[in-house]
Amino acid sequence: MTAAADPVEAIVCRRARTPPPGPAAAEAQAHANALRGRHGPGVAAILMYGSTLRDGQVDGRILDFYVLVDRIGPAYAKALPRALGALDQPNVHFLPAGEGRAAAAKYALMTLPQFVRRCGPEGFSSYIWGRFAQPNALVWARDEDAEAQVIAALARAARTMLGSAAPLLPAGAAPEDIWTRAFSESYRAEPRSEPPGQAAALYRANADYYDAIANAVGETRGTAEGAQRAWARRRVFGKGLAVARIVKSALTFEGGVDYAIWKIGRHSGAPVSTEGKSRAQKLAILWRLVRTRAIR
C-alpha cells in the first residue's frame, strides 16, 4: 500500500501497521491464522483492539479482534448463525486457547462494507466508531485494496468520534478535553460499568496519537444542541441494541450463554459464575441478568 495522502489516514496507517507490543505480537498472528482457517477465503482483514493491544500482556486475558469478511453467509456453516448474522451485525464469537494460542479470544464478525459504513456518521451508534477511533492493529489484510479500505474506515471513525463531542465543548477546546468527553459519552451509550476517570485514562494511554489525530482533523462543525440530542438518542438506542446483541450471542455460537453472562456481569460491575451450572440454569441466569442489570 502506498503512503496515504490524507493526513488522518497517514497517522492511522502508521499505527495500524505497528505490531502489538510484547507477547501479544506472536499471539495476534496465531489467532489471525486460526480465524482465517475458521471463516475461509472470504476474510478480507483482521483487526486487533483493546487492552492487550495497549500493554502487550496475554496472561489471564481474552484478546479482542474484528474479522471483516466479504459476505456473512459463507462465513457460517450453520443456518441460525447465518440468519441472525445477516439480520444484525456484528456477530460476537469465542475462540478458545489451544493449537499454539496461549490465550482465548472473542471476536466480532461483520462485512467489510458494513464496517466502512458504520465507522462514519451513517453509523448512528458509537458502538463501532467509538471503538475504532482508538488505536488498532491491522494484524492481517488480504491485499492492498482491503488494507486501504480498512485504513480509510479507521480515519472516518476518528473524525466521527471527534465530531460527535467537539460541539459539546467551547471552541478551541484542547484535544484531551474533546477525546475525554467523547469517550465518556460513548461509555454512557452502552450498558457498561466503568470506574471514575476511565475516559481520561484511555486518552492518556495514547495521548500523542490522539493529539496528532485531533490536530490533523482540525475544527469540526456542529451545534451543542444537536450533539446533545444525538447522544441522548444514542443512550436509548445503544443500550437496547447492546442487550439484543448479547442475547443473540447466546444463540449463535458454542459457549455463547457463558459469554453473555460474563459480558453483562462484567459491564454491570458484578461478575457472575456459571461454573457447575446446567444449560437450563445458565439460561435462567441470563434472563435474570437481562431483566435486572443489562439496561439501566
Image (cartoon, rainbow, N blue to C red):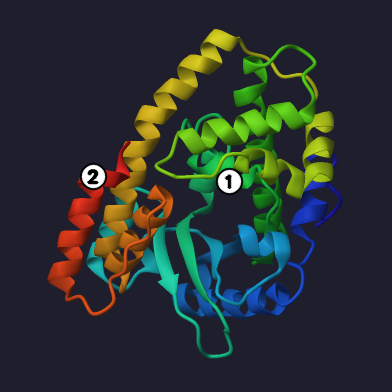
Q: Position of residue 203 (x, y in %)?
A: 72, 41
Q: Quadrant of the C terminus?
A: top left
Residue 93, can we see it?
yes
| Left or right: 218, with 281 as reference point | right
Q: Is residue 272 left or right of residue 1?
A: left
Q: Residues within 10 Å of mark 1 (few under 14, many from 20)?
A: some
The image quarter in which residue 171 lies: top right
Q: Position of residue 217 (x, y in %)?
A: 78, 29
177 left or right of 49 in image: right
Q: Of 101 and 147, which appears nearest the observer? A: 101
Q: How busy is the neighbourhood of tag 2: few (under 14 within 10 Å), some, or many (20 plus)?
A: few
Compared to 214, does 25 lie above or below? below
122 vs 253, nearest the viewer: 253
Residue at the image point whose x is 33% and y is 50% from the top: 245
Residue sitting at x 53%, y 39%: 117
Residue holding disc 1: 131
Question: Residue 262 in the image: x percent, y percent?
Answer: 36, 62
Horizontal side of 119 relative to 144 (left or right) equals left
User: SS class of the residue under badge 2?
Assistant: helix
Q: Secondary structure at mark 1?
A: helix
Q: Residue furthest bottom?
A: 99
Say which amino acid is labelled 1: Arg
**Mark 2 residue type:** Thr
Q: Is residue 175 above or below residue 111?
A: above
- The answer to whether residue 160 shows anywhere in this view is no
Q: Quadrant of residue 83?
A: bottom left
Which residue matches tag 2?
292
C-alpha gap between disc 2 and disc 1: 26 Å
Whichever of callouts 2 and 1 sits on the residue coming sooner in the sequence is 1
- Taking the spot 69% from the left edge, 57% from the top edge, the residue there is 147
The quadrant of the image that shows the N terminus is: bottom right
